[in-house]
Image (cartoon, grey):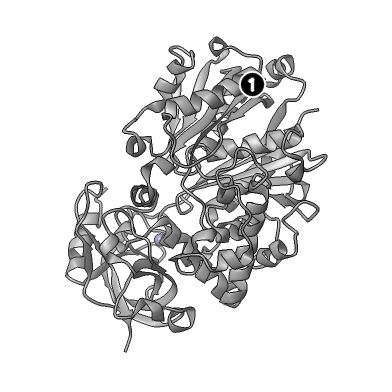
């Protein structure tokens, strides 16, 4: 069975600000980030599709304590976004002052993908890591 | 399958950074468990040991083999379990399985961790390894951030104004500190009131320092034996009457099921079904309060309170002695501490000690017969529940 979308392929596209997902030929669900099978029905009959990279914030937090080696990044905002195509995706929210990140300002609000942030990696991470990066729409 | 009992238990004090090695910490807990079981090291047929981060804390992998030999259990099969904070509970569940199956009669299970020794920056980095390292860590995700996001989601989903949720969460921490203060084995032994919780350092919005459990060092151990052997060793065996375990992938994959944690609900259902019991049959519960919000999500997932209502239950004392269900009388992970690879064994230790009425009077429940442990690994990637019943 061919592996449709690997971590590396997904990440390389993400670095170009392109969000790739997998659409299930059996049930129609979209899976992102990639898995071997459909997140809903476990079918391996998947095709790679480009996603819009827009959705609504479901929840968020402003982190003030960083993992070792990432101290320079705080404070930063992590979000869970429900994409237009259905899946929830974790990412970073930029373009907002952390002290303005309240439930009223963020939950349910529309976001779109912007220039992808790349964690350069540390001695444990097996290289760099691109992460979906969002900003509030308009 | 045979009936399986816990015969003897042991536990170190949970604490900040220790000068003792993991092998030494486990030895203290194991010696207490063996002595309480009237057993010698040669009687132990296998060691199942939870240890999540020994590789990082002291550069020690395969600690189980060294721990076995160190206590005189020479050359026995020794397995290490890594399920993040649920590691020891996985070990206990497997010990139950091997004894229930008839393959072994007497197994030593437990866990050890030196999470405090790592210090906050390295501990924060290594704990984040229990989230998805490829797709979620790059965002800067930390463990507090996972539960902080669940807290905002909980407030939004159940329509609870955030200031009210914050009071509910503070009540959870205050109750845990109240009992930890009396627990001689607890890491944090101090009275903390609601004002102190709400004015503590903001770790990851909306969770503050007193919403978060500490990084702890410590170990716990228990002897698991067949019913026949158990009655020969003790007049107070505690039977394992139900176990459940389940797994889940990255946090975001749970989608709209959040802030509930699917693996917990599946695991708990399996444990209840095996035991033939329901949530209202449980007298005492040690649940996984790595963060205050985790207590609310757990108490609801375990069926003690309706979704979105457990914060009010805590405020009303419904999760306290004399309430609907007595939760975390040990002080929980919040005050007793969280040496992650040992935590599940520490929860079982507490329930056994409660049944035997051997805990400090300020936190002793009278007449408890049935107890439940709930141990969560990672951001819900591993869940284990164990239901215990006093045998006498
Ligand atoms: Zn499908």
Q: Quadrant of the C terminus of chain B?
A: top right
Left or right of residue B264, residue A29 in this image: left
Crowd around label 1: few <14 · some 14–19 · many ≥20 (10 Å): many
Can you give x and y, in whole percent of width and height, for residue A30 in the image? Answer: 36, 66
Q: Nearer the viewer, residue B141 or B176?
A: B176
The residue sitting at 32% across, 61% down in the picture is B140
Kindly identify which chain the residue marked by label 1 belongs to: B
Left or right of residue B212, residue B244 in this image: right
**In the depicted structure, whether residue A112 falls above or below residue B180:** below
Q: Nearer the viewer, residue B386 or B342?
A: B342
**In the depicted structure, whether residue B345 falls above or below residue B129:** above
**Quarter-of-image position of residue B204:** bottom left
Can you give x and y, in whole percent of width and height, for residue B296 in the image? Answer: 61, 60
The residue sitting at 56% across, 51% down in the picture is B334
Residue most extreme to the bottom: A138
**In the depicted structure, whether residue B335 falls above or below residue B252:** above
Mark 1: which secondary structure? strand
Q: Which residue is mark 1?
A: B225
Number of marks: 1
**Quarter-of-image position of residue B192:** bottom right
């Amino acid at each position: 069975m061919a592996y449709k979308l690997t971590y590396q392929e997904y990440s390389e596209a993400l670095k170009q600000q392109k969000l790739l997902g997998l659409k299930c030929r059996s049930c129609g669900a979209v899976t992102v980030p990639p898995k071997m099978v459909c997140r809903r029905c476990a079918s391996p009959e998947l095709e790679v599709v480009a996603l819009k990279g827009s959705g609504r914030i479901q929840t968020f937090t402003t982190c003030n304590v960083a993992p070792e080696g990432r101290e320079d990044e705080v404070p930063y905002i992590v979000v869970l976004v429900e994409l237009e195509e259905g899946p929830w995706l974790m990412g970073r929210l930029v373009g907002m002052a952390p002290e303005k990140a309240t439930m009223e300002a963020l939950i349910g609000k529309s976001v779109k993908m912007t220039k992808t942030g790349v964690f350069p990696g540390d001695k444990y991470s097996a290289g760099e890591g691109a992460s979906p990066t969002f900003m509030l729409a308009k | 399958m045979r009936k399986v009992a816990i015969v003897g238990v042991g536990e170190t004090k949970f604490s900040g950074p220790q000068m003792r090695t993991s092998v030494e910490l486990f030895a203290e807990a194991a010696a207490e468990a063996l002595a309480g079981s009237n057993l010698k090291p040669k009687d132990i047929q296998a060691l199942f040991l939870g240890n999540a981060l020994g590789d990082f804390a002291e550069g020690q992998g395969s600690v189980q083999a060294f721990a076995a030999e160190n206590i005189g259990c020479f050359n026995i099969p020794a397995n290490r379990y890594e399920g993040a904070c649920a590691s020891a509970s996985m070990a206990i569940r497997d010990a139950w399985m091997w004894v229930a199956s008839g393959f072994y009669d007497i197994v030593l299970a437990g866990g050890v961790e030196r999470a405090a020794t790592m210090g906050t920056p390295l501990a924060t980095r290594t704990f984040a390894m229990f989230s998805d390292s490829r797709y979620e860590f790059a965002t800067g995700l930390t463990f507090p951030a996972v539960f902080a996001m669940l807290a905002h989601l909980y407030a939004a989903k159940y329509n609870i104004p955030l200031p009210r949720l914050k009071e509910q969460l503070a009540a959870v921490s205050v109750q845990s500190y109240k009992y930890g203060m009396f627990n001689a084995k607890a890491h944090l032994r101090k009275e903390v009131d609601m004002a102190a919780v709400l004015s503590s350092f903001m770790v990851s919005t909306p969770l503050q320092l007193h919403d978060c459990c500490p990084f702890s060092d410590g170990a716990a151990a228990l002897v698991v034996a067949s019913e026949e052997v158990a009655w020969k060793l003790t007049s107070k065996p505690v039977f394992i009457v139900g176990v459940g375990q389940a797994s889940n992938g990255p946090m975001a994959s749970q989608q709209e099921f959040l802030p509930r944690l699917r693996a917990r609900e599946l695991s708990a259902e399996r444990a209840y079904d095996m035991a033939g019991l329901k949530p209202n049959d449980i007298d005492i519960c040690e649940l996984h309060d790595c963060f205050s919000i985790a207590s609310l999500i757990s108490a609801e997932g375990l069926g003690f309170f309706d979704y979105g209502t457990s914060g009010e239950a805590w405020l009303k004392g419904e999760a306290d002695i004399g309430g609907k269900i007595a939760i975390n009388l040990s002080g929980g992970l919040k005050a007793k501490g969280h040496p992650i690879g040992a935590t599940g064994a520490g929860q079982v230790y507490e329930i056994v000690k409660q049944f035997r009425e051997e805990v400090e009077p300020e936190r002793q429940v009278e007449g408890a017969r049935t107890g439940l442990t709930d141990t969560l690994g990672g951001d819900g990637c591993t869940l284990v529940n164990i239901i215990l019943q006093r045998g006498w």
